[in-house]
Image: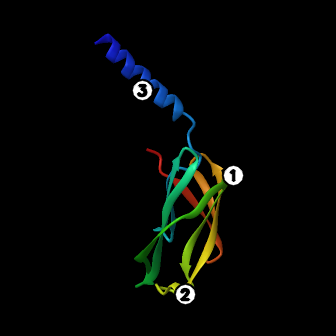
Amino acid sequence: MKIVTGFLLASTLMAAAAAAPDSPIAGTWTAQLHNQPCIKLTVNDHGGKLSGNIIFYLLMLEGGSWKVKGDTHVDLINPRLEGKEFVFEVPHAKKHGSTDPADQEIKTFRMQLTGKNEAVFKNAAEGSDLIIRRKVD
């Protein structure tokens, strides 16, 4: 029994040591605009191989207040860290709401990491930068 317990403990410690370096980008990042969610970015880091998806929320002014009126989920293309910047591409409709492949283009987004759980999402809302924060579990 002591051998099994020792083996399990050693295996757990080795796994923890292998996972010790925290990813600067992995996690769920969110941003708000007009007190409503506007972006939810999920990034996975599997041994340096990054993947994930992003949700862009459609906000509309209705009756004098902003409301979420829809969302678009897309997978990240070629997500990568370039120094302190997280860069990725996504397919983006040239015409709002179009799903026709002929109306799609690839758009590049950049996120400047400014702290452990905070970044600036560049040119996110009508050319303005947004603060985006990582959810801490």
Residue at x 56% of width, y 50% of height: 49
How far, Cα to Cα, is label 2 from label 3?
50 Å
Residue at x 48% of width, y 87% of height: 100
Farthest residue to the top: give it.
2
Q: Which residue is mark 3?
A: 12
On the question of residue 24 being in view, the answer is yes
Farthest residue to the left: give it.
1
The amino acid pointed to by label 1 is: Lys
Which label is found at residue 84? 1
Quarter of the view holding residue 104 = bottom right
On the question of residue 123 being in view, the answer is no
Single out the mark in the foreground, 3 or 1. Answer: 3
Single out the mark in the foreground, 2 or 1. Answer: 2
How far, Cα to Cα, is label 2 from label 1?
32 Å
Graded by Cα atoms within 10 Å as few (under 14), some (14 to 19) or many (20 or more), the crowding at tag 1 reads some
Q: Pinpoint residue 91: horizontal percent, then vertical percent.
A: 55, 75
The amino acid pointed to by label 2 is: Asp
How far, Cα to Cα, is label 3 from label 1?
31 Å
Depth check: give the residue in front, 82 or 35: 82
Q: Which residue is mark 2?
A: 103
Tag 3 secondary structure: helix
Say above or below: 131 vs 7: below
The amino acid pointed to by label 3 is: Thr
